[in-house]
Image (spheres, grey):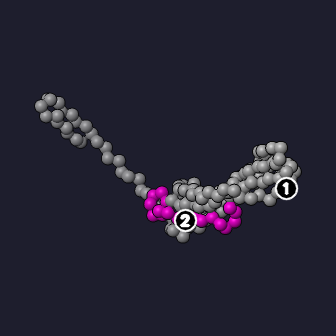
Amino acid sequence: MVRLSLAGLGVVAIASVAVAQAEPAARVPSDAVLRKALEARCMQRMEELGQVEKSNAEQIAWEISPIAVRGTYTGFVSGEQHVCALGTSQSAQPTGTMRYQEVVYEKAGKTLSAAQGDEARPIEINEITEIFIYRDGAWR
C-alpha cells in the first residue's frame, strides 16, 4: 500500500501496488552448444543464399545494345568462406553474427547466346553481417 499526499492541496491518494515477481530466466545453453547450433544455422543460411544465387542467375535481366549484351546478378561467396561468431552468450538473449560476401556478377557477350554462355565475373563485392538471436531454443 502506498500513501501519497499532495501537500497543500488537501488531496490524499491511496493506491495498492502489486509487485510482480520476475519470471525465472530461461536457462541458456553452454557456449559449446550455442556455437554448434550457430554453425548449423550459418550453414543453413549459406544453403538458402545458394538457392537465391541460383534463382538470380536464372532470371538475369539482359541489357541488349547494338554492340553487346550484358547482364548482372547477385550471388554469394560459397562454401566454408563465411564466418560465424558467438556474441553475448550468457545473457537472456544470446546473439551471434555471420559474415559473408555478397557478389555482383556480370556476364557479357556480343550476342545473347554468347552472354548466357559467358563465365560470370565479379564486378562488386560487399561484406555482409547478419545478426542472429537465440530464442525459444533456436537461432533466428
Dot 2 falls on a residue whose secondary structure is strand
Give the image quarter of residue 121: bottom right
What's the residue type where badge 2 is placed? Ala
Q: Nearer the viewer, residue 6 or 57?
A: 57
Residue 64 relative to residue 75: left or right: right
What's the residue type where badge 1 is placed? Gly
Q: Main secondary structure of the magenta part?
A: loop
Horizontal and vertical percent for residue 74?
70, 52
Horizontal and vertical percent for residue 31?
51, 68
Residue 90 relative to residue 52: left or right: left
Residue segment shown in magenta? 77-94
At label 1, counting other C-alpha atoms closer than 10 Å, the crowd grade (few under 14, some 14-19, many 20 or more) is few
Image: 120 above or below 64: below
User: Is residue 48 visible to the viewer in this orientation of the structure?
Assistant: no
Q: Which residue is mark 2?
A: 85
- Which residue is situated farthest in the bottom direction here? 32
How many marks the image carries: the answer is: 2
Name the residue rendered at 41%, 53% in the picture: 23
Q: Which residue is mark 1?
A: 117
Dot 1 falls on a residue whose secondary structure is helix
Name the residue rendered at 77%, 52% in the picture: 57
Task: Give yes or no for residue 93 being in the magenta stretch.
Answer: yes
Name the residue rendered at 83%, 47% in the picture: 67
- Which residue is situated farthest in the front direction here? 67
Residue 140 relative to residue 76: left or right: left
- Which residue is situated farthest in the top direction here? 10
